[in-house]
Image (cartoon, rainbow, N blue to C red):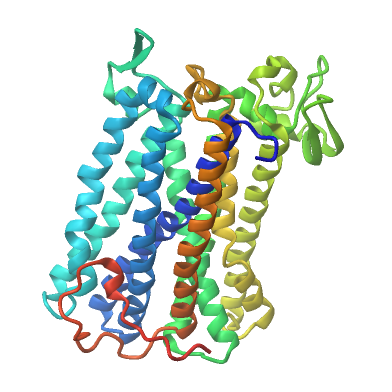
Amino acid sequence: MFGLDALELARIQFAFTVSFHIIFPAITIGMASYLAVLEGLWLKTGNQAYRDLYHFWSKIFAVNFGMGVVSGLVMAYQFGTNWSFFSEFAGSITGPLLTYEVLTAFFLEAGFLGVMLFGWHRVGPGLHFFATCMVALGTLISTFWILASNSWMQTPQGHEIINGVVVPVDWFNVIFNPSFPYRLLHMTTAAFLSSAFFIGASAAWHLLRGRDTPAMRKMLSMAMWMALIVAPIQAVIGDAHGLNTLKYQPAKIAAIEGHWENPPGEATPLILFGWPDMAREETRFKVEIPYLGSLILTHSLTEQVPALKSFPPEDRPNSAVVFWSFRIMVGLGMLMILAGVWSLWLRWRGGLYQSKPFLYFILWMGPSGLIALLAGWFTTEIGRQPWVVYGLQRTADAVSAHGDIHMSVSLLAFIAVYCSVFGVGYSYMMRLIRKGPQAHEGDEPSGHGTPARPLSAVHETLDDRS
């Protein structure tokens, strides 16, 4: 299809499915903690607005959780169908790590999810709050194991290769590999920011339509406090992650920077914009700032950053992709910091909920966290190429022996099914958000019997589609 071979089609298919999937866990991770905070504040203060917000956002959480589980199962199957040689080579490490995720995180979430979604009138408030906290903890434990597995593929250690197969010899080193702490913090804060701007944009939309209620104000206020505090922390974590990547994956950094060669004795400039040309081995139309590349990446004005020409052509990531995906992530991160600072200034002036320019800005920033998260994952995964396990197994050696036709048909089928099924789910979620939280929501039992699945928690008719 389109002149692509089976390897390229398999990579596109996995990228497509993981890009759909990661959106739902990202919102789920942040929103589960948000729900725990809302319920805790309601128990402490008795403020009805917190309770209304809890019931409203628990419906969005249920929709996200359901779609995240379904899309995640497909990814797991792809390891066996499209990447069987990777599973054969590294399955002794990735298999147990994903199993630990199911045994600890998924079972914890599943065990308490029913109480959280359907137990409001069936258990006491203390037990219900405990269930919400356990679901939130489960999402964080899930993040831990998934990032441990993926980070090992980036910076593998704690293993031996026996008869061409990876064998774990030190599970502590396998899990706590060099990039794991940075990537775990980076992903978790990214999920919190994604949820914060998702929630903040929802509040801004309602406020712009004249629905100025205590619940809407608290939605926007809490989201902006998160942006103000966490966005700068994310920038610090990102800087530390970059230094770690420079040490263990220098080719990825060279590709991110679009940096091709180091003239003797010259510090590395920072290329703000340009177009890395892999064929011509140069970054065209570049706009650069002298010394700044060395200062950011080495914290020195004299040390040089590794250049792409220092690596064989077959070991170079595609700089044109990661160069721009990284800049999209960083650019959106800077806008998040701006949003937090702007909100603080408006809060001081007493106009946080009335400033239309600010509210429109937050509305347009709604998907920024998810876009930045996707751009970050593209940078990480494409920047690892041509390795599937960095330095140990090339991506070309990991793909299953499928033909171009088989991969083309399955890719088109995935696109059609995902766009239809998850498109409906996304539309339904947006309709829920447009309806907004209702006063005294959840006061009475739903009367729908005993629900059997997360989506049963959403029993709205959505007649009001305004």
The residue nearer to you, when weighing 27 against 340, is 27
Look at the picture and state if 429 lies above or below 207: above
Residue closest to the far top: 163
Q: Position of residue 211 (x, y in %)?
A: 52, 91
**220 shown above or below 186:** below
Estimate the x, y position of residue 329 in percent, counting from the top left: 62, 49
Q: x, y percentage for residue 328? A: 67, 50
Going by the image, does 398 lie left or right of 135? right
Quarter of the image containing the N terminus? Answer: top right
User: In the picture, residue 380 is in which quadrant?
Assistant: top right
The reply to whether residue 239 is visible in this rendering is: no
Relative depth, front residue between 422 and 110:
422
In the image, farthest residue toward the right: 285
Q: Give me the residue at 34% from left, 62% from top.
A: 66
Q: Is residue 103 above or below residue 341?
A: above
Left or right position of 10 against 268: left
User: For this view, does 337 lie left or right of residue 200?
Assistant: right
User: Toward the viewer: 458 or 327?
Assistant: 458
Task: Measuring from the top left, give residue 427's x and y in whole percent.
Answer: 50, 72
Q: Residue at x 28, y 74 (%)?
A: 457
Q: How many marks?
A: 0
Q: Is residue 323 left or right of residue 157?
A: right
- Give the residue at the far front of this rendering: 405
On the question of residue 255 being in view, the answer is: yes
